[in-house]
Image: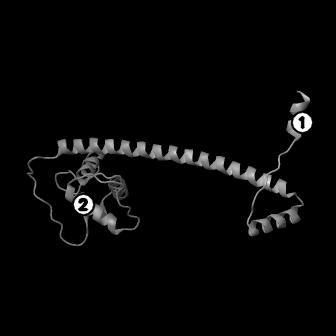
Amino acid sequence: MNPKGKQFENEQKSITIKLSAALKHQLNTTRKKTGETQGKIIERAIAELLVARQELKEDRARQKLTARQLRDIANDLRRVAQKIDKVAFEQQAHDCKSPDVILIGKKHPWHDHPQKEKLFQIVRDMHRVGANLTMIASALNLEGLQAFSEDGEWEVADIDRIVTEIKKGQGYLPPLYSLPE
């Protein structure tokens, strides 16, 4: 290395910085406590600012990646919901031969259902991602959970009553998006 290059590395340039009175007071207080020069304190503050800026850029990149992943998940859920809706439409009976079951009294049939927790969890989760009642009924039929009706098939009215019960309970979250019935 030539002597001129070494001389350039050892040289320091001076700059003038205008500070508010409060910042100047804080700088003098720090200088008295630590014994550092004002230049060193300012250099450290600038270095910390540059590091913080870099961390902020990295944090924004992580947030964009997370947002992209969440968008992909939402799109996948929409596709699943559309497939379930298609299956539900194909399975829906065009002529209803069984009579409607009318419940008398305050006790609902799901209170004694053997898989009540699983039933409520499936209905809650599917409702949360925007599945309509027909889709939820089809999913429960596909899952093989015991239905309330005599024909053994889940009906939209049953799901509507369960969703209403879930809304009354604690921890209800409205759907992220909804599909038309």
Which of the 4 image quarters holds residue 7? top right
| Residue bearing the label numbered 2 | 160
Q: CA distance from mark 1 to mark 2?
A: 82 Å
Q: Residue at x 76, y 57 (%)?
A: 17
> How far across and down, in percent of the image, does residue 37 sit?
87, 57
Q: Is residue 38 above or below residue 103?
A: above
Q: Secondary structure at mark 2?
A: helix
Q: Secondary structure at mark 1?
A: helix
Which of the 4 image quarters holds residue 115? bottom left
Colour scheme: one colour
> How far across and down, in percent of the image, does residue 42 sit?
79, 55
Name the amino acid type tagged 2.
Asp
> As rendered, which of 74 and 119 lies closer to the eye?
74
Q: How many marks?
A: 2
Going from the N terminus, do you reach mark 1 or mark 2 first? 1
Q: Viewed as shown, does residue 135 lie left or right of 56?
A: left
Q: Of tags 1 and 2, which is closer to the observer?
A: 1
Do callouts 1 and 2 mark residues in contact (Cβ within 8 Å)? no
Q: Quadrant of the N terminus?
A: top right
Q: Viewed as shown, does residue 38 lie left or right of 117?
A: right
Name the amino acid type tagged 1.
Gln
Determine which of the numbered discs, if any, sits on residue 148 in the image: none
| Residue bearing the label numbered 1 | 7
Q: Viewed as shown, does residue 87 lie left or right of 19?
A: left
> As rendered, which of 138 and 148 lies closer to the eye?
138
Q: Residue at x 33, y 64 (%)?
A: 166
Q: Is residue 9 above or below residue 17?
A: above
Q: Residue at x 73, y 66 (%)?
A: 20
